[in-house]
Image (tube, rainbow, N blue to C red):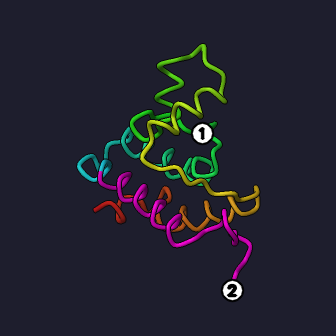
Amino acid sequence: KDKTVGSGVSGLSNERISMIKSDVSKILDSYQPHIGEESAKKKALELVRALPKHHCGDHSLCKHEDFCTFRKVKNENPEMSDAEVAAKAASESMRSHQLSLDEVGQHHLLKILEKRFGEKSIDNSAA
């Protein structure tokens, strides 16, 4: 069993894998009607690339508030600190669980996601 992607209480449990699958499905569903449009593909790829960090509570790659409650709250309240934004976003979000993967684990998860939902494959995955 590969332990590099995370194990234990904050690792890749079935529940967390389901959350990631749900987010990938949402990304693909939003991209599907716009396959072939460069801006839609760019957004879908940005969302896929942001997923590992996003699920670990790092929203530095999150650019689209329609997919990230933290980004939405931050855009609405630019004067709030990140800790205040995180608390408000957690209260507004339907999800409260967070992954705890180190950089290596996040990188490994991203490589798995990009293999299936990368630059060359996302069109086929969304179709």
Judge the density around disc 2: few (<14), some (14-19), many (≥20) Cα neighbours within 10 Å.
few
Q: Quadrant of residue 124?
A: bottom left
**Relative to the observer, which residue lies in front, 85 or 61?**
85
Please identify the quadrant where the N terminus is shown: bottom right
Residue 117: x and y in percent read 47, 61
Identify which residue is drawn at 52% across, 17% down.
77
Say which mark, if any, is on residue 61: 1
Mark in the foreground, 2 or 1: 2
**Relative to the observer, which residue lies in front, 126 or 10?**
10
Identify which residue is drawn at 69% across, 59% down.
107
Q: Is residue 57 left or right of residue 66?
A: right
Question: What's the residue type where badge 1 is placed?
Answer: Leu
Q: Secondary structure at mark 2?
A: loop
Residue 16: x and y in percent read 53, 64
Identify which residue is drawn at 45% across, 66% down.
18
Residue 13 part of the magenta-drawn span:
yes
Q: Secondary structure at mark 1?
A: loop
Placement of 77 over or under 69, stated as above or below? above
Instruction: Determine the CA span between mark 2 and mark 1.
Output: 30 Å
Placement of 54 over or under 4, stated as above or below? above
What residue span does the magenta drawing correspond to?
Answer: 1-29
Question: What's the residue type where badge 2 is placed?
Answer: Lys
Placement of 79 over or under 89, stated as above or below? above
Say which mark, if any, is on residue 1: 2
Identify which residue is drawn at 51% across, 72% down.
14
